[in-house]
Image (spheres, helix red, strand yellow):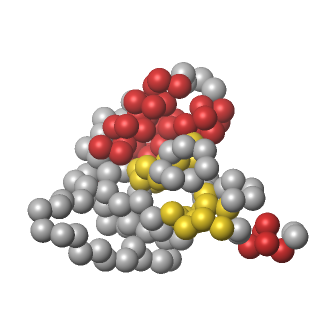
Amino acid sequence: MNTEIIALLEAHGIKPTANRIMVARALTETVQPLSLAELERRIQTIDKSNVFRALTLFRDHHMVHAIEGGGDGTRYELCHSHCDDHDEDQHPHFFCERCQQTFCLDHLHMPELLLPEGFEAHSTNFIIKGVCPHCHHSE
C-alpha cells in the first residue's frame, strides 16, 4: 500500500516523507471525510501541527478536499484528481444533523454557477444538511 500512496503523493508533486505517507494512508482507509482531531486520534505518532501541515500541503496540491460547514469544523478527504493544479472531482457533501457525520455524495455533480463578471472562484463547498438514512430509519 505504501507504494500506491507514494505514487499518489508524487503524482501531486509532493515529496513523500514518513509523516505525509501516514496522513495519506489514514485518509485512504476511510470512506468518510475526517476532521483534524479524528486524524490525530488515528495517527498517534504524529503531533497535531505535523498532521495539519501535511493536510495544508495536500490541499495546496489538490490532493485533498477541505470540506467546511458541517458541524465540527473542517473535514478532509482524498481528492480523486490526477494532477496538482486543479480538482477534477468536485462533489457535494451531506451533513447529518443527528449523528454529526459527513458523507461524500461523489455520484452527484456540483451545479455549475455563473458568477458575476469580475468574480473568480478558487474553491467551492456544497453542504447539504439534514438526516442520513440510518438516523431517519432509527426514529
Please indicate, yes or no, whether residue 27 appears anywhere in the rendered image: no
- Tell me the residue at 59%/23% (across/down): 45
- Tell me the residue at 47%/68% (across/down): 92
Which sits in the foreground, 50 or 101? Answer: 101
The spot of residue 18 in percent (x, y) is 45, 29
> Position of 127 compared to 45: left or right?
left
> Position of 76 compared to 29: left or right?
left
Which sits in the foreground, 14 or 54? Answer: 54
Which sits in the foreground, 135 or 45? Answer: 135
> Position of 40 compared to 91: left or right?
right
Please indicate, yes or no, whether residue 114 appears anywhere in the rendered image: yes
- Tell me the residue at 69%/59% (across/down): 97
The spot of residue 40 in percent (x, y) is 60, 32
State which quarter of the image contains the C terminus.
bottom right
How many marks are shown on the rendered structure?
0
The spot of residue 135 in percent (x, y) is 79, 66
Task: Give the answer, above or below, for where 16 lies relative to 107.
Answer: above
Toward the right, the furthest residue is: 139
Which sits in the foreground, 9 or 42? Answer: 42
The spot of residue 54 in percent (x, y) is 41, 34
Task: Give the answer, above or below, for where 133 lies relative to 95.
Answer: below
- Tell me the residue at 45%/65% (across/down): 126
